[in-house]
């Protein structure tokens, strides 16, 4: 097959297709969105393949689990925080086990380029006690994902492929291998898949019994590689995932060659680690994310007679992503000579709402309506409108996680915040805003929810939104919000006065009210126009 | 042989189109390529950059180490300065002089250009003027690619070929405007070369 120039995300997608994939599910989230984007494109040619956006990550994971139950292969992909949402089915899928191969591709975002934290998904793999691959480059992203499907079927467990932003969003050549067909339909055994305590206890024992075999697989994996230098025993480096690249980038340019253990799987290969540690005086652990391997090696008491360096020792930073120049001093190399920008104050250029964005008009109207309410608080959510926290709007005061605007507004209202306002987009509302609205409507909480319906998932590139338009209004009504307190406005500059009046009326209402601001995302509208 | 290039600009200015054209030309000639991109939040009018690495040997890091970049190719002057510390001491800068002002505290443009001129190997191009001359203000990225093309390790003809591929789904006048923009940029780089 022909080599292709692919994003790391796309390499995962292509490998899954070639592994005999039946279906793929995801919810958009940077830096994982391009995995499913690419599979949707591939599905145009490969008619058997189902690739679709789900309403949230939990639903996506459960859909994939259903495919696995039916004996077929499934890929589920998401960003790191998406796995928090999917944690329930994820943890339990290690207990049920898999029937058809089930692979979870999760993309972490160290440095929080587009995220609210930089949690390290390797802890989730360890938590669920499943096997995890961590590719260092595009070819490995492909090869490991293919291997992950085999391994899932060999061990009867889901397998994680952990990516990070710099691999997900970098392009390089990938050499694919022969594609294979789908699995036949074959149902899982109900005694394995019905997690009543009697079954769950038996299944959990099976999971525990499988652990030594997972370690053995790691020991034998071609993705872990130890190179010992017999001439220089001073330093040994353990490097995992893309951190390996930053180590090698610096070493090749200097001709320096400490012993290096490259790690690409979890559980980590214990024998190889022991060999390296025994061989050298000082061990440096370089890993992208939390000091996961380093903590394991250090334990409570460290390694007697050896020096262990890494993030915990302060040789590498505990936060933010690694880079060649961050790793360089830890290897004992001086910085490269470079040009400096001296005597000039660089100003930041943060992202911002687009020209003509409907959110801008909605937020301006909301700000005006809230004038004269010193106790007001606007709880917001995950989406483009979070940029409304920046000047000139300064329109929202919180952003925590998907759907939290509605639930926090309810909690805030019950603690005395008045007016208590939630601002959430249509897709985020479908993801996690509907359930807290059900709560708030049942309690008739004194709060106002503003749903910005731009008919798309805008921030991640315009994926479809399911809680939009007429369906959205019916959902709100179905949740129990009184019809007369569901108000639909069109956020346009010419409607400003009218919209302020509507918002003010609902702020004054003692009880639950919802304002739906309906206008299509300008970027999507432009794209559509160009397509037509 | 290797070339490490920082591509810089503001979300929406077509940085990734420049990357596609250089990548494709490099791959055609058997070079290895790595190209780190910015997706997501920053694409909404924020600062964006791409690390483009071409080499005839194995490339490890997706990110160019600070001090390794051979060139900063930037469609916006303030964005040029943002990545100056990636440049090796003898590295060159090919920068647009046209400011993209979408922030309230944009510095004095003369001060910005003055800083760029301090780099011995600098080339400043009025990309907006040349793009308009080519027929579309949206072709500034191709003007800058044309200006940089005299210093790239890939061939001019290959670049032009892949500009055609990039815009093949668009109408002929779009392809023509982009190729003209490239040629005007290349021409403007002449006196310095």
Image (tube, grey):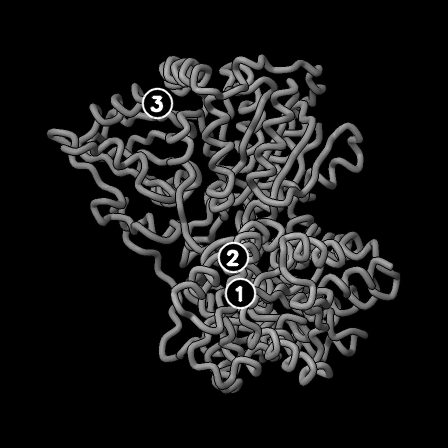
Report the chain holding disc 1: A
Q: Point out the frontmost of discs 2 and 3.
A: 2
| Residue indicated by mark 2 | A443
Q: Residue at x 47, y 51 (%)?
A: B63
Do the residues marked 2 and 3 share a common chain?
Answer: yes
| Residue indicated by mark 1 | A422
Image coords of residue A385 (percent x, y): 57, 66
Say if A189 sits above or below A232 in the image. above
Say if B83 sits above or below A369 in the image. above
Report the chain holding disc 2: A
Circle 1: element type: strand
**Dot 2 and dot 3 residues touching (CB under 8 Å):** no
Q: Point out the frontmost of discs 2 and 1.
A: 2
Give the CA separation, mark 2 to mark 1: 16 Å
Residue B5 visible, this orientation? no
| Mark 1, other Cα within 10 Å: few <14 / some 14–19 / many ≥20 | many
Circle 3: element type: loop
Do the residues marked 2 and 1 share a common chain?
Answer: yes
| Residue indicated by mark 3 | A269
Image coords of residue A71 (percent x, y): 64, 18
Quarter of the picture holding the N terminus of chain A: top right
């Amino acid at each position: 097959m022909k080599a292709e120039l692919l994003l790391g995300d796309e390499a995962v997608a292509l490998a899954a297709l070639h592994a005999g994939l039946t279906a793929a599910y995801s919810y958009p989230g940077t830096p994982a969105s391009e995995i499913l984007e690419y599979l949707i494109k591939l599905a145009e040619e490969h008619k058997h393949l189902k690739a679709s956006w789900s309403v949230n990550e939990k639903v996506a994971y459960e859909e994939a689990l259903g495919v696995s139950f039916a004996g077929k292969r499934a890929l589920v992909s998401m960003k790191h925080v998406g796995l928090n949402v999917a944690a329930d089915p994820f943890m339990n899928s290690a207990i049920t086990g898999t029937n058809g191969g089930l692979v979870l591709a999760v993309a972490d975002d160290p440095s929080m380029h587009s995220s609210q934290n930089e949690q390290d998904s390797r802890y989730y793999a360890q938590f669920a006690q499943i096997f995890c691959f961590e590719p260092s480059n595009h070819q490995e992203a492909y090869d490991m994902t293919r291997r992950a499907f085999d391994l899932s079927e060999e061990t009867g467990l889901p397998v994680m492929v952990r990516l990070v932003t710099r691999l997900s969003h970098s392009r390089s050549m990938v050499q694919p291998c022969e594609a294979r067909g789908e699995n036949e339909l074959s149902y899982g055994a109900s005694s394995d898949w019905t997690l009543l305590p009697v079954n769950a206890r038996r299944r959990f024992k099976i999971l525990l019994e499988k652990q030594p075999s997972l370690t053995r697989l790691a020991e034998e994996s071609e993705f872990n590689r130890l190179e010992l230098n017999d001439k220089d025993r001073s330093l040994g480096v353990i490097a995992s995932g893309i951190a390996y690249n930053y180590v090698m980038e610096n070493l090749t340019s200097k001709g320096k060659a400490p012993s290096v253990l490259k790690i690409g799987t979890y559980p980590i290969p214990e024998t190889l680690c022991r060999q390296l540690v025994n061989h050298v005086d000082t061990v440096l652990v370089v890993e992208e994310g939390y000091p996961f391997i380093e903590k394991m090696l250090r334990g409570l008491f460290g390694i007697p007679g050896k020096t262990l360096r890494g993030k915990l020792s302060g040789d590498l930073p505990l936060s933010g992503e690694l880079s060649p120049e961050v790793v360089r001093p830890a290897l004992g190399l001086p910085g490269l000579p470079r040009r400096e920008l001296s005597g000039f104050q660089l100003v930041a250029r943060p992202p911002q709402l687009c020209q003509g964005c409907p959110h801008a008009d909605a937020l301006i109207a909301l700000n005006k309506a809230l004038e004269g309410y010193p106790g007001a608080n606007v709880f917001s959510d995950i989406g483009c409108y979070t940029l409304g926290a920046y000047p000139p709007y300064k329109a929202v005061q919180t952003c925590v996680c998907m759907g939290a605007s509605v639930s926090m507004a309810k909690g805030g209202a019950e603690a005395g915040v008045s007016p208590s306002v939630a601002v959430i987009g249509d897709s985020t509302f479908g993801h996690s805003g509907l359930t807290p609205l059900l709560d708030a409507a049942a309690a008739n909480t004194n709060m106002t929810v503003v749903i910005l319906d731009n008919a798309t998932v805008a921030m991640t590139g315009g994926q479809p939104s399911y809680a939009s338009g007429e369906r959205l209004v019916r959902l709100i009504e179905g949740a129990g919000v009184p019809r007369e307190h569901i108000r639909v406005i069109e956020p346009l500059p010419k409607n400003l006065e009218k919209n302020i009046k509507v918002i003010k009326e609902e702020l004054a209402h003692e009880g639950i009210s919802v304002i739906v601001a309906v206008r299509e995302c300008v970027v999507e509208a432009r794209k559509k126009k160009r397509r037509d | 042989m290797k070339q490490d290039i920082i591509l810089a600009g503001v979300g929406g200015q077509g940085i990734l189109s420049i990357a596609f054209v250089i990548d494709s030309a490099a791959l055609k000639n058997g070079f290895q390529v790595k190209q780190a991109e910015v997706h997501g939040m920053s694409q909404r009018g924020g600062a964006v950059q791409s690390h483009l690495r071409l080499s005839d040997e194995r490339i490890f890091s997706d990110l160019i180490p600070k001090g390794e970049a051979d060139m900063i190719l930037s469609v916006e002057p303030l964005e040029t300065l943002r990545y100056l510390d990636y440049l090796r001491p003898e590295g060159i800068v090919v920068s647009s002089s046209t400011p993209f002002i979408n922030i309230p505290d944009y510095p004095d443009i003369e001060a910005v250009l003055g800083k760029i001129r301090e780099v011995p190997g600098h080339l400043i191009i009025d990309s907006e003027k040349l793009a308009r001359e080519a027929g579309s203000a949206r072709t500034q990225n191709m003007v800058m690619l044309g200006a940089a093309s005299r210093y790239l390790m890939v061939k001019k003809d290959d670049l032009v070929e892949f500009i055609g591929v990039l815009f093949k789904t668009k109408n002929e006048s779009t392809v023509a405007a982009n190729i003209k923009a490239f040629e005007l940029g290349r021409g403007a780089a002449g006196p310095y070369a």
